[in-house]
Amino acid sequence: MNKRLLVHLLGNILLIEAAAMLPSLLISLIYGDGDARAFVLAMIVLCLMGLPARLLAKPRTTNLRAREGFVTVALAWVLLSAFGALPFVISGVIPHYADAYFEAVSGFTTTGASVMTVIDGMPRGVMFWRSFTHWIGGMGVLVLTLALLPKMTGRTSHLMRAESPGPSFSKIVPKLSDSAKILYIIYGVLTLIEFIALLLCGMNAYDAAIHAMGTAGTGGFSNYGASVGAFDSVAVDIVVTVFMVIFGVNFALFYRVLVGDWKGALKSEELRWYLGIFGASALFITLMITPQYGSVFKALRYSTFQTATIMSTTGYATANFDLWPEAVKMLMVILMFVGSCAGSTAGGMKVVRVALMSKLSLREIRHTFQPRKVQVVRFEGKGVEESMLAQIATFCFVYVLLILLGAFVISLDGAHGFMENLTAAITCMCNVGPGLGAVGPAGNFAAYSPFSKIVLSMLMLCGRLELFPILVLFHPAIWRKG
């Protein structure tokens, strides 16, 4: 383990987090809500920790191996959340550190689960930081680091591979630093377009920025207790729905469109699966809730929004789907697992894994009555290697196992019942935000004990980092020399 390189990289990341607090500090000074001190102190702490790590721990070699890549990613997200919680605590918005850490993890992992019982009227600088963590975490803080510091190490692909949402990672251009810059440019431009669209819908600049960042990062923190439903606007609902679907698409497809390969982007099998599941689910929910709303248009408006918010794992709400029919709630839970496309800002198991596991299951069924026939699982027009299928099967098993273990552990609290505990674990692992019952769209996670909040925080980190970067921290071999 190259510990000097590890400390050096973490120092860089803490300094970037200090710089990332500047917009929130500016918002605090503009509105004068008294929370500017919290950001000044937090930035001082970050600089005191980051500068010595960057300057004194200069690595003798910049050869970044897989183990350093995975450990750097895991520790970076843990530390970002640990220090990102400081503004909440210092300002008094969330006085208990365990609660503030949960909120920060939920922000950076773009989960959107909250322990805050009062949202309206909170200091605007702190609330801006709360949503800005979504925007930073959505594309990935290590991707941002590579974009800003492209020469910091020799083999940075391990960083992006460990942080990349999906079963595989590929560069969109030969140079990794250029790939990182292109991804953030696309990300920033799409965020800006949504911001302008929300302004045109009648939002003020502050609200538009909050909700554009929440949508872009597929996080879902709002500065209103009623979330997007507080605006009661068809236009706002449509804009947010469209962009939630857009940010659930693999960003590599946007690059294809930019270089003129429209046909290649539209032929994406993963995209067809994603849009097909979204369309079929929204139609089913519309049919199921139309009697409840008395209007097909109203039912369609709420069903498409809630389907998009769950599949994209954004977590915004315009209606309390906990009051919808049981079949719809079951479908919502299934969609939490499915998530969106790999290479997007969304969470969940990813559509590509669901598609491949479906094809693998069908192959095994056919194999029972055609045992001698060689059957290759194909995706995107190519045969999928058996090693990749085995890796995906392992991922899915560990994913579900961690959800069940997490639900069991938090159930020891006795704070909530079976449905709340299970869906709390699911929604945290899948980085969605709301579950069902007391942790649903109209509820929060405040009733859980500090220990349960740490457990749920670990589930959020595991889900955002595709399990293994967090899990390898607990493997003794990763820390051995050589």
Image (spheres, rainbow, N blue to C red):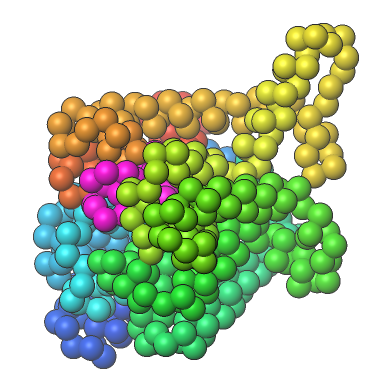
Give the farthest residue toward the bottom.
Answer: 30
| Residue 97: image location, x then y, percent | 16, 54
Tag count: 0
| Residue 348: image location, x then y, percent | 50, 44
Q: Residue at x 55, y 48 (%)?
A: 284
Q: Is residue 204 visible?
A: yes
Choose top left, top right, bottom left or bottom right for residue 366: top right
Q: Of residues 394 and 86, which is closer to you in this image? A: 394
Relative horizontal placement of residue 460, taking residue 279 as reference (left or right): left
- Characterize the magenta stretch by its predominant secondary structure: loop
In the picture shown, does residue 468 fall above or below 318? above
In the picture shown, does residue 110 fall above or below 241? above
| Residue 87: image location, x then y, percent | 22, 67
Q: Residue at x 67, y 50 (%)?
A: 276
Relative horizontal placement of residue 327, taking residue 395 as reference (left or right): left
| Residue 352: image location, x then y, percent | 66, 42
Q: Of residues 100 and 180, which is closer to you in this image? A: 100
- Magenta residues, start to end: 426-444
Relative horizontal placement of residue 92, taking residue 388 as reference (left or right): left
Relative horizontal placement of residue 288, taking residue 374 as reference (left or right): left
Q: Is residue 141 magenta?
A: no
Q: Residue at x 62, y 44 (%)?
A: 351
Q: Of residues 157 and 330, which is closer to you in this image? A: 330
